[in-house]
Image: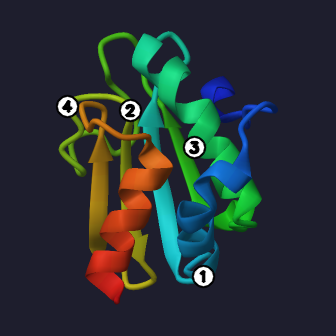
């Protein structure tokens, strides 16, 4: 099931986030983005459209993006396996299925910026 909140924000300005987009693009074929969210969740509606736009601007292939829709009790696929407590949560994995980094709703910068910084630090 696709998340409505992951539909890219048409007014998002990729040029303002060039470093983040470049980092996501450079690793576009190496990483998988697993996103847990709910279209009913205000934090998801606030954060994910810009993240969707960043993934689109970075040309991250669709098969590298997995979306998991949760109900209002935050139940759904992979919740227990990945220890999902808050949403949105974005887990970034390498091709071996090892977690590289994780964005959880309370970070103080947008998901694309935060994840790009973590990816650069972990995979540099």
How far across and how far down the image is residue 86, in percent?
25, 28
Which of the labelled discs sits on residue 119, or is there none? none
Which of the labelled discs sits on residue 85, or is there none? 4
Q: Which is closer to the viewer, label 2 or label 1?
A: 1
Q: Earlier in the sequence, mark 4 or mark 1?
A: 1
Classify 44 as above or below 34: above
- Is the residue under label 2 in contact with that under label 3 (CB below 8 Å)? yes
Q: Distance between the residues labelled 4 and 3?
A: 20 Å
Q: Distance between the residues labelled 4 and 2?
A: 9 Å
Q: Which is closer to the viewer, label 4 or label 1?
A: 1
Which of the labelled discs sits on residue 51, or is there none? 3
Q: Distance between the residues labelled 4 and 1?
A: 30 Å
Which of the labelled discs sits on residue 26, or is there none? 1
- Is the residue under label 1 in contact with that under label 4 (CB below 8 Å)? no
Label 2 belongs to which residue? 88
Classify 5 as above or below 23: above
Element at label 4: loop
């Amino acid at each position: 099931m696709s998340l409505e909140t992951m539909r890219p924000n048409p007014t998002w300005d990729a040029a303002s986030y060039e470093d983040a987009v470049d980092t996501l693009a450079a690793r576009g074929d190496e990483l998988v983005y697993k996103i847990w969210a709910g279209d009913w969740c205000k934090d998801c509606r606030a954060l994910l459209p810009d993240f969707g736009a960043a993934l689109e601007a970075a040309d991250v292939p669709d098969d590298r993006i997995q979306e998991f829709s949760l109900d209002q009790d935050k139940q759904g696929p992979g919740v227990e396996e990945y220890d999902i407590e808050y949403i949105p949560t974005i887990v970034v994995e390498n091709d071996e299925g090892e977690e590289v980094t994780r964005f959880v709703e309370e970070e103080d910068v947008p998901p694309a910026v935060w994840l790009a910084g973590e990816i650069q630090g972990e995979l540099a």
